[in-house]
Amino acid sequence: MSLTRGAQSGFTLLEVLVAVVVLSLGLLGLAGLQAATLRNNQIAYYRGIAVQQSYDMADRIRANQIGAKDGAYDSLGASIPADPDCVSNVCSPAQLAVADHSIWNTNNANMLPGGVGTVAVNADGTFSITVSWNENTEAGSVPQSFETTIVP
């Protein structure tokens, strides 16, 4: 009977070791899943901000119909112009368009990594609003963009 006990000596320790290895692999997989979830949530957050920002500019264009008809929104670039401060001063529709552009692109830069926005008028009179940002900060990553077209 003592021979049987001697042959099985240490078997329980081996089972515990295998269980610890399996549990460790499971926890590593769970940590990787959590990291991927956080990354995807950040991407979704940036895309949601880009959609909100493009609709913000669409609302600004619709609110300034005179400026839109006069061409003040026809080609807004990525650079941020000086704000004419239309909150405390009376502004013309063209100055209001400059203020809209300044506030909008400042918000894009503050809310999105490398965020910039552009507006261009199309041949049919619609406006293409594009918000671009760097979704991934790695070298060589392709910037993301969201574009919407509106009829003022």
Image: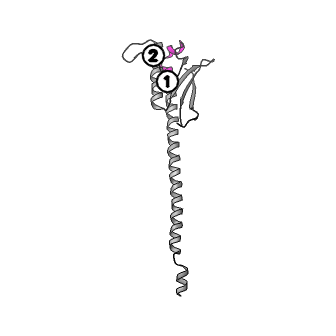
Q: Going from the N terminus, do you reach mark 1 or mark 2 first?
A: 1
Please name the amino acid that badge 2 sits on.
Leu
Q: Which residue is mark 2?
A: 96
Residue nearest the viewer, comparing 61 with 7: 7
Q: Is residue 7 above or below residue 110?
A: below
Q: CA–CA distance between discs 1 and 2?
A: 13 Å
Element marked by disc 2: helix
Residue drawn 52% across the image and 66% down it: 19
Residue nearest the viewer, comparing 152 with 90: 90
Provide the residue span drawn in magenta: 59-72
Does 46 appear in magenta? no
Please name the amino acid that badge 1 sits on.
Asp
Residue nearest the viewer, comparing 55 with 79: 79
Near mark 2 (Cα within 10 A), the count class, few <14, some 14-19 or many ≥20, is many
**Percent x, y for residue 133?**
53, 31
**What number is the disc on residue 126?**
none
Near mark 1 (Cα within 10 A), the count class, few <14, some 14-19 or many ≥20, is few
Q: Which one is closest to the eye, mark 1 or mark 2?
A: 2
**What number is the disc on residue 59?**
1
